[in-house]
Amino acid sequence: MNTSIHRGVAAALLLLMISGVAGAQTRRRRPPSEIADFSYYLLVLSYAPDFCDQPQGKKDFRECGAGRHVGFVVHGLWPQGETSRGPERCGGASPVSDAIVQSMLKYFPTESLIQHEWSAHGTCTGLSAAEYFALVRKARDTVAVPPDLTQATRSIEISPPQIEEKFHASNPSFPRGAFRTSCYRDGELNEVRICLNKDLVPRSCGPSAGECAIPSVRLLPVR
């Protein structure tokens, strides 16, 4: 075998080895010693019009631009403690592959949020990135957003319990206690949180899931 052919074969083998390592990292589960303890999941749906109205935080045109008509988006799937906030940033977070990112942009508004959620929450689940985001997709696909809250054409004033009741009416197989609201200090809706067991069976939320304590919140119309 001449030198140029030999070098070509060696380069091809090296490329295959690198690809194999990258694939293994994508599929790798964290060992039990590195998995944080948690009780259940919170599927967190952010209400984009109210988020975009807040003065703080970076706003992306794809979520906040006029004419985008974005309502609820996935904020994340968070490991949660029964009586305490769940674990975060459990370490060992390699960047999420572009293939996974592209598949998740139907659910999350931006690439940066996808990377953040993996680093902050996905690393604590014991799952690989591919497994974690497959779980996010499955969780989100099980939840129906109430039709009158999906594409609001005018500002709505509504109480947190009414929002939760609307979500229950749209998801009658879920316990009534599976839904919680979170709000901003100015009275706008921040998130709706849905409580799910680790196998994604709906369950009632624990006290750590939080609750908006004000009498009513405001939902701005979609842009």
Image (cartoon, rainbow, N blue to C red):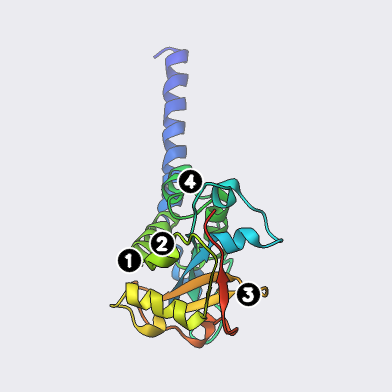
Mark 1 or mark 2: which comes first in sequence? 2
Instruction: Kindly report the distance in space between the C-alpha atoms of the residues bearing marks 4 and 2.
Output: 16 Å
In this figure, which residue is indicated by the disc labeled 2?
Answer: 136
Whether the residues at callouts 1 and 3 have beta carbons within 8 Å, the answer is no
Mark 2 or mark 3: which comes first in sequence? 2
In this figure, which residue is indicated by the disc labeled 1?
Answer: 142
Instruction: Kindly report the distance in space between the C-alpha atoms of the residues bearing marks 1 and 2.
Output: 10 Å
Give, as a three-letter code, the residue at label 4.
Ser
**Residue at 49% of width from left, 52% of height from top?**
69
Q: Tag 4, which secondary structure?
A: loop
What is the x, y in percent for residue 90?
Answer: 56, 67
The residue nearer to you, when weighing 182 against 129, is: 182
**Residue at 49% of width from left, 72% of height from top?**
192
Mark 1 or mark 3: which comes first in sequence? 1
Viewer-nearest of labels 4 and 3? 3
In this figure, which residue is indicated by the disc labeled 3?
Answer: 187
Q: Residues within 10 Å of mark 3 (few under 14, many from 20)?
A: some
What is the x, y in percent for residue 196?
Answer: 39, 75
In this figure, which residue is indicated by the disc labeled 4?
Answer: 97
Viewer-nearest of labels 2 and 3? 3
Give, as a three-letter code, the residue at label 2.
Val
Give, as a three-letter code, the residue at label 1.
Thr
Residue lying furthest left: 173
